[in-house]
Image: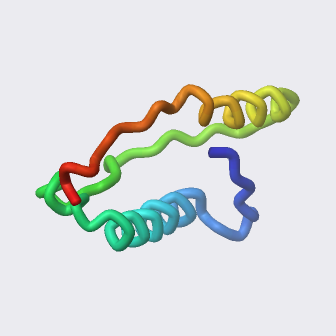
Amino acid sequence: MLIEIPPKYQISFAVQTMKTMTSVYLRKKFRYIDKIYQDGNLWGAGYFVSTVGLNEQQIKKYIEKQGSFDIGEDASEFS
């Protein structure tokens, strides 16, 4: 994921907000998630952050190609 966070926001706050919002969304969309993650934690405790400099275009291309390699998994048995 490549995002730009304005300097007025703490990175930890932005990551926490993204994790919270995506967890809420995914749990509503895929109700079976609660059966899989019995401890209630959808995301791990940590995160990695790095700055992007001159190689931003390379990183964007890499991220765009990730979708073509993602086969996905069949979770219909949990519905």
Q: Specify how the rendered protein is coloured.
A: rainbow
Q: Quadrant of the C terminus?
A: bottom left
Vertical placement of residue 55 versus 23, above or below? above
Q: Quadrant of the N terminus?
A: top right
Q: Position of residue 5 (x, y in %)?
A: 71, 60
Q: Is residue 56 left or right of residue 25?
A: right
Q: Position of residue 49 (x, y in %)?
A: 58, 42
Count of marks overlaid on the render: 0
Quadrant hosting residue 25: bottom left
Q: Residue at x 85, y 32 (%)?
A: 57
**Which one is nearer the viewer's eye here, 7 or 18?**
18
Vertical placement of residue 50 versus 43, above or below? above
**Which one is nearer the viewer's eye here, 22 or 5?**
22
Vertical placement of residue 8 versus 69, above or below? below
Q: Position of residue 17 (x, y in %)?
A: 49, 68
Q: Residue at x 38, y 68 (%)?
A: 29
Q: Is residue 5 left or right of residue 67?
A: right
Q: Residue at x 56, y 26 (%)?
A: 69
Quadrant hosting residue 65: top right
Q: Is residue 52 left or right of residue 73?
A: right
Q: Is residue 14 left or right of residue 2?
A: left
Q: Position of residue 76 (x, y in %)?
A: 27, 51
**Which one is nearer the viewer's eye here, 72 or 6?**
72
